[in-house]
Amino acid sequence: MTALSLMALPACSANTPSASSTDGSGLTSVATVPGKSEASTDGPVLSSEQLRGRLLTAGDLGEGYVPKPQRKTGQSAGRDDVTVIGCPALEKLGGEAGAGGSLDFPRRAKAAFTYTGGRDAELSAELYSDTTARLKEGTGRIFAAMTSCPVYQVVLGSAPVKVATQKLPAPDLGDEVWSQLLTFTAAGRDSVVKQTAVRSGTVLVVVSGSPALVDTHVEKALAKAAPGA
């Protein structure tokens, strides 16, 4: 359950009408600062190496956090035995993406932690970088698909998992923001994961894990990944 939970990404979450607008794709844009054009949010596209230097560390998080081992560079993170049932939009994406997997941007970095102060509490932070246009289009496709299906099923190998999604009020951060609560049910057990994603210019930050841990550290993750956001 833990591996599946941290594999999932959030769907879009709308802010209040006075603070956001939608473009019809399910993507919700946070209002920019008055006088600040969309073009001015662009910045340099960062390499994977640069993104790794901007990831949260155990030292940033504080006492009680232990890093989890990551895959070696270049090792495939995908799975061929993932099937989505009951959500046509996600079924079309297929494989890991169809199950809410990592976004398909080549410049990426990820760190994951276990919080020893809570039972089975985990936190992960993923960073992506690309042009603003590509980040908007790429994230929009997956987020809109997930929004279309509040309940669906994922089969990992031969193990079925029910996935229920709930949109949450998104924090007022960055240029675009999404937040969602996902409940995974397998073998009579539930696992709840909160996920918040924030785009600031050419950097996208996705924080997933225990709801309380996500709320505590999402601003810190954004501040380190996109200084001045």
Image (cartoon, grey):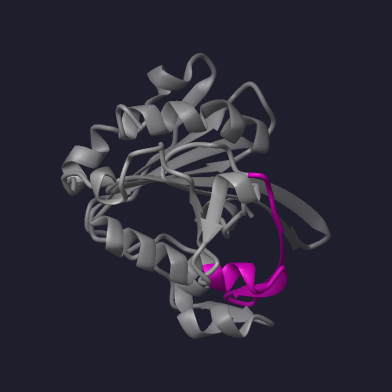
Residue 8 visible in the picture:
no
Q: Which image quadrant: the C terminus? A: top left
In the picture, measured across the screen, residue 148 lies left or right of residue 65, that is: right
Q: How many marks?
A: 0
Which residue occupies the extreme right position in the image? Answer: 188
Region rendered in magenta:
144-169
Q: In this view, does 195 lie above or below 188?
A: above
In the picture, measured across the screen, residue 9 lies left or right of residue 54, that is: right
- Name the residue rendered at 48%, 40% in the picture: 124
Asked if the stretch drawn in magenta spans residue 166, the answer is yes
Rendered location of residue 186, percent (x, y): 75, 62
Q: In this view, does 92 lie above or below 16?
A: below
Q: Nearer the viewer, residue 38 or 174?
A: 38
Q: Is residue 201 above or below residue 150?
A: above
Rendered location of residue 106, percent (x, y): 24, 60
Q: Nearer the viewer, residue 227 or 215?
A: 227
- Name the residue rendered at 80%, 55% in the picture: 189
Which residue occupies the extreme top position in the image? Answer: 63
Asked if the stretch drawn in magenta spans residue 105, the answer is no
Q: Which image quadrant: the N terminus? A: bottom right
Q: In this view, does 57 lie above or below 34?
A: above
Asked which quadrant contains residue 64, the reply is top right
Residue 185 visible in the picture:
yes
In the picture, measured across the screen, residue 9 lies left or right of residue 76, that is: right
- Name the residue rendered at 58%, 60% in the picture: 11
Rendered location of residue 227, percent (x, y): 30, 28
Rendered location of residue 214, percent (x, y): 58, 35
Which residue occupies the extreme front position in the image? Answer: 35
